[in-house]
Amino acid sequence: MAARLFEKYKNEIRPVLQSEFVQNKMLTPALEKVTISVGAGEAMKDTKLMQNISDTISLIAGQKAVTIKSKKSVAGFKVREDMPVGVKVTLRGEQMYNFMDKLCSIALPRVKDFRGVDRTGFDGHGNFNFGLDEQLMFPEVEYDNIIKTHGMNISITTTTDSDVQSFRLLELLGVPFTKTGRA
């Protein structure tokens, strides 16, 4: 069974984007991938905490997370080569649409005093980045299983190079943006 948000994109959103921006179906803006990443910080010295972060991100994404290791030693940060410095997972296809649906319709509305996602996260090439302060907003995460709360960065990559087209795509997909700011 196809993801609910993907069906909405195919049947409702794609025709709107084609009429507003392009006539060629192949040039219609679409989601390419969603990357969720967490920097370890002081957790890189604690293997149990790193494993907990990896398990949490895997649970949220529905796909196994990859531990990122440092490429070289940096004495100022007390980092040695091949130390774990973060965790990431890249979602594509059906899992990407399922995650975006869960993020926009379940997780973000659960944030206390949530006023929307800041519109200034566009990078000039049609991609959007924003951060979340904690992982407890996702329904899969149980508070008792968390050793330490952590934030995460979510990067949404689209097939367009235009921030305006990317903003319109995400707006139609249901990303709750703030009322003020630039696009």
Image (cartoon, rainbow, N blue to C red):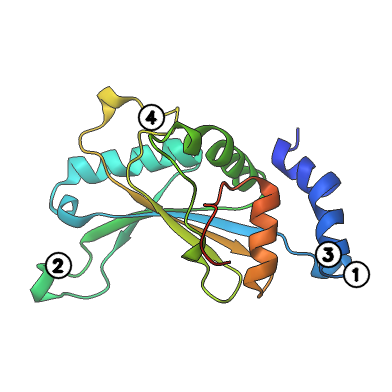
The quarter of the rendered structure image containing the N terminus is top right
Secondary structure type for disc 1: loop
Callout 4–callout 3 Cβ contact below 8 Å: no
Count of number-bearing discs:
4
Badge 3 density bin: few <14, some 14–19, many ≥20, Cα 10 Å: few
C-alpha distance separating marks 4 and 2 = 29 Å
- Closer to the chain start, of discs 2 and 1, is 1
Upstream in the sequence, badge 4 or badge 2? 2
Q: Amino acid at mark 2?
A: Val
Whichever of callouts 1 and 4 sits on the residue coming sooner in the sequence is 1
Residue with the mark numbered 1: 23
Quickly name the residue at label 4.
141
In terms of image quadrants, where is residue 145? Answer: top left
Query: Which dot marks residue 79?
Result: 2
Query: Of tags 1 and 3, which is closer to the observer?
Result: 3
Q: Identify residue type, mark 3.
A: Glu
Disc number lying in front (2 or 1): 1
Up/down of 2 relative to 72, above or below = above
Q: Which residue type carries mark 4?
A: Val
Q: Residue 160 appears in which quarter of the rendering?
A: bottom right
Q: CA distance from mark 4 to mark 3?
A: 39 Å
The residue nearer to you, when weighing 42 against 102, is 102
Name the quadrant of the C terminus.
Answer: bottom right
Measure how far apart labels 1 and 4 are at the Cα level. Answer: 43 Å
Q: Earlier in the sequence, mark 2 or mark 3?
A: 3
* Residue picked out by circle 3: 20
Whichever of labels 4 and 3 marks the residue nearer the N terminus, that label is 3
Identify the residue at horizontal 70%, vertical 50% (top origin): 172
Q: Disc 1 or disc 4, which is closer to the eye? A: 1
The x and y percentages for residue 65 are 41, 48
CA gap between label 1 and label 3 equals 9 Å
Where is residue 2 drawn, in percent x and y? Answer: 75, 37
